[in-house]
Image (tube, rainbow, N blue to C red):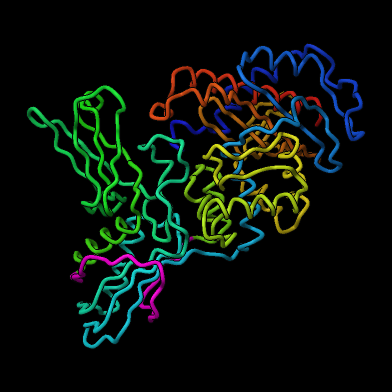
Amino acid sequence: MMVARRWVLGGLLAGAALPLWAEAPAVSLRPKPRTIKGSEAKVADAGAGALVAAAKLTGVVGYCVADLATGRVLEASGEATAMPPASVTKAVTTAFALEKLGVDHRFVTRVMRTGTVTNGRLDGDLILAGGGDPTFDTDKMGDLVAALAASGLREVTGRFIAYAGALPERAEIATDQPDFVGYNPAISGLMLNFNRVNFVWKAVNDGYALSMNAEGARFVPPVSMASVQVVDRDVPVFAYVAGTAQDRWTVARGALGREGSRWLPVRHPATYVAEVFQTMAAAQGIKLTKAEVVYDLPAGAEIVRHESEALPDLLRKMLRFSTNITAEAVGLAASGAGSLEGSAAVMTSWARRRFGVDAVFGDHSGLGPKTRISPAAMVQVMIKARQDKRLAQLHDLLKTVDLPSTDGKPVAKAAKAGTATRVAAKSGTMNFVSNLSGYVDAPGGRSLAFAIFTADVPRREAVPQWNREQPEGDKAWVRRAHRLQGQLLNRWGKSFL
C-alpha cells in the first residue's frame, strides 16, 4: 500500500502508549476470569469495553489476547467473528513461504543465450529470463546489464526474448481497487520497480510537459510503453485504458498543479521490463531488437545473473513496508499454483492443516475482498507459528518497538536497562479496516499473542471504486482504530505481564 496509508507501529505506540501507561486504571488490573466456550479462561471487564466504546468506531471490533506458553485466552471480545485481515495476511504468507521455500531461497533473474559468442558477437538469441523477483529494480537491472557488457558481449544477431512465465501473469492483484493505485500492480515472472512506472509532469506555457520513466537512484531510463494524456474533467483523477502491450492513462487537469510525480501501476510488466532492459543495454553499446515476450523458457546457456536477497531478508522488508507484490510473489512461488486464486486456495488448505483455523485466503497480501479470519484464529496462528521451529522466525521478522516498562521508566532508559516490554506485530489497513496482530514480550520471559481487528465492511463497500484511495471519513476512522490498538496493548502489557 501507499506510504501515506500505511500505519507505522512505532508511531501508534509513541502517540498512545505513554499517556495511557501513566493513567490510573479504572478497574482492577487483574480482572476476575469467567468461563468461556472450550473451558478456556477469558476476562472481559469494563476497562476494555470502555476503551472500545470510547473509540466510537462504526462496524465491528474484535480482539483476543492469549498467553503464548499455554494458549489460555486472557481477554477477548468478538474474537470468533471472521473479518478482513488486510495486510495482517502477510504474517500468514510469511509462515507459508518460510515452510515451503526455505530460508535459503532467492529469486534469480538471468540473461541467457542460444548459439555461440565469437569476438563479442552472439549468433543466436538473447534471453532475459525473469524468476519472479518482486524486488528487482532499475539500479539492479543496470548492474546486470553492466555485467553483461563486461562479459564481452557487443552484438546480438538473433532475437531478444523476454521470458515472463516463472509466475502466473495477471494485470492486477485485486479487481476492486482504483486503477491508478501503485499498491495494486500486475504480477509476472518479470517485474521491475514493484511493477510501477514514474509519471512526471511540469507546467509549460498553457499546458504540461509529461514523461514516463523507470527512475532508480542511479539510472532514469525513459519509458514509452506507458503514456498519459491531460483531460478536462473533475473525477476520476486518473483513468486507465488498456492497449496491446501498452498502458494508456488520462489525468484530470485540475489535479496536477505546477509540477510533480507519481508512481502508477504497470499492467503489462513483461513489456515494461523488456523495454527498460533494451534501453539500458543500448547505453552499454548492445543493440537489441524489440522484445518477444514468451511464457515457456527456451533452452539456453546462462551468461550473467542477479540474485535477490535471501528469503528472510526479503520477508522482513515485505512486513515492514507492506509490499503487496512481494507477498503475492512469494506466495505464488511457495504454492507453485497456476493462478493467484489457486495459490490462495493452497495457502488456505495449508493454514487449516498447520494451525487448525477456519480461515479463507483470497490472495497472499490481504488486498482483495475475499480473505476472512477471526481474531481468535489469528492468535492461534501466532501461537503455533512461534512454537514451530520452521516458522518461529516470523517473530523476528516482524517490526518491533518498545512499550514503557511497568516501573514507569522512559522507553529509552527501560530499553537500555533491559526492562522494556517489546511488541512485534503486523498491521493491516484498508478503507474502514484497521488491524494489528503479533506478540507482546516481557523482559522476564512471559509473552502474549494478540489480534485486534476493526472493520466497517458495509461502509467500505459503499465507497465508489474510483474513490477508494482516500475516501471521506476514512482517515479519522483509522486514526481512532489506531488509538484503540495502542490503548489495548498498553492495557494488556500492564495487566498480564
Please tell me in which quadrant of the rendered image residue 79 appears. top right
477 vs 52, left or right, is left
Q: Where is the C terminus found, in terms of image quarters?
A: top right
Magenta stretch contains residue 481:
no
> Which residue corresponds to the image point at 58% horizontal and 44% vertical from the top-left?
362
The part of the chain drawn in magenta is: 285-308
Please tell me in which quadrant of the rendered image residue 299 appears. bottom left
Residue 441 position (above or below residue 490): below
> Which residue corresponds to the image point at 81% horizontal and 29% vertical from the top-left?
496
Q: Residue 17, image x and y in percent? A: 64, 23
Residue 110 position (above or below residue 493): below
Q: Residue 125, image x and y in percent? A: 28, 78
> 253 or 482: which is nearer to us?
253
> Which residue corresponds to the image point at 61% horizontal and 31% vertical from the top-left?
435
Q: Is residue 416 visible?
A: no
> 46 or 131: which is nearer to us?
131
> 174 or 94: which is nearer to us?
174
Q: Residue 280, image x and y in percent? A: 24, 62
Q: Is residue 289 visible?
A: yes
126 vs 61, left or right, is left
Q: Residue 168, image x and y in percent? A: 47, 59
Question: Which residue in the rendered view is the most extreme toward the left?
Answer: 205
> Which residue corresponds to the image point at 59% horizontal and 59% vertical from the top-left?
335
* Callout count: 0
